[in-house]
Image (cartoon, rainbow, N blue to C red):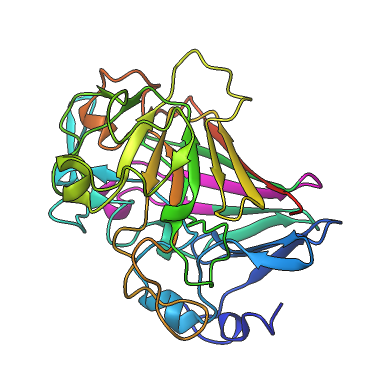
Amino acid sequence: MDTLFPSMTEQAAYDGQPANLIELTNQAGMRVVLMDIGATWLSCVIPVGDEMREVLLGVNSMADFLRQGSYLGATVGRYANRIARGELMIDGLQYSLSTNQAGNTLHGGAVGFDRRRWQIRAQSVQSVTFQLLSEDGDQGFPGNLHVAVTYRLDEQGSVSIDYQATTDRATVVNLTNHAYFNLNGAEGGTQCLDHKLWIDAALYVPTNAVGIPLGELCPVEGTAFDFTQIKRVGEPILQGEQQITAKGYDHSYVFASDRDTTQPIAKLWSADEKVQLTVCTDKPGMQLYTGNWLAGTPNRHGAEYADYAGLALETQFLPDSPHHPQWPQPSCILRPDERYQYQTRYQFVCFAK
């Protein structure tokens, strides 16, 4: 593994020390590499016929990881996605959060969980658990938050991510993974726009020019956001003001509250139809991001990714949820007598052609 990522275990990360890498494998030859910096999903290589195919965007050096700002494969928090103006009110108390995008809080602020070193609590051939203490006041958020994230690889080609958190003061929590998928092969120079996609959601969240929700939840029917029937990602892209402003998809989908959470909420297919990714989750929503601003992000070959090089399927609470308690989802507020506990499963299936 060190020959694949030599500088990751040699060069200093954010805290001045090199990273620790963990490799998970199964009998089919699938290989998943995780890193303690950001509890990051660094690599996912799957057997496709006689080929071993890397399906995650990523980097090979710590220098490139430190200079990228695309959250490649990282666990993001304390609150994934956006909180408008960095303003948070809980039980009548006002908190000012770290702002890092257009005056808003994105993915937990300037020093989010993606920039932290997580402790490795447990590991085996097919699982690893990372833990982190986010102290009271971290990026402006209240409460000492204890977080654990467990990655598991199984013999069926599934990567499961379990999220748990507890707090000693009321706070908000919204954790997700920011992996970018390109099922054609992450380093092949293709776009995610030629993938086919299905999403089991009837509503989406319209946003303003900087990704803050406008407040309403709108039907996908009759819009470019409708993936209830399988279609190519690039087929409806840049149709309408919402997409033109975002330069593609960067929007959340709302899942039915009464759905069976063991059933898929999204499926993605490579252009050659040799790889299918199925997503299952008990989270209430998912951000679809088509890598609209990836240009300039370093890749594994000393060059850079282009826009639309990969897409993210980020399961989570809806963006800016603290300002929209009326939305049909569980409360994003975590209290001392509660446990934040969710799971997302990404299953890769390969078809011989």
- Is residue 142 shown above or below 52? above
Magenta range is: 132-156
Q: Quadrant of the N terminus?
A: bottom right
Q: Is residue 295 left or right of residue 193?
A: left
* Residue closer to the observer: 18 or 275: 275
* Residue closer to the observer: 116 or 145: 116
**Most extreme residue toward the front, as rendered?**
353
Q: Residue 263 magenta-drawn?
A: no
* Residue drawn at the location 63% of the way across and 25% of the way down: 262
* Residue closer to the observer: 58 or 106: 58
* Residue drawn at the location 57% of the way across and 80% of the way down: 8
**Most extreme residue toward the right, as rendered?**
27
Task: Locate residue 108, reporting x and y percent.
Answer: 32, 51
Task: Locate residue 151, reporting x and y percent.
Answer: 65, 50
- Is residue 95 shown above or below 64? above
Task: Locate residue 87, reporting x and y percent.
Answer: 16, 41
- Is residue 279 shown above or below 155? above
Task: Locate residue 307, reporting x and y percent.
Answer: 33, 65
Residue 139 makes an appearance in the image: yes
* Residue drawn at the location 48% of the way across and 41% of the way down: 197
**Most extreme residue toward the top, as rendered?**
258
Indicate the quadrant where residue 332 lies. top left
Q: Residue 137 magenta-drawn?
A: yes
Residue 15 makes an appearance in the image: no
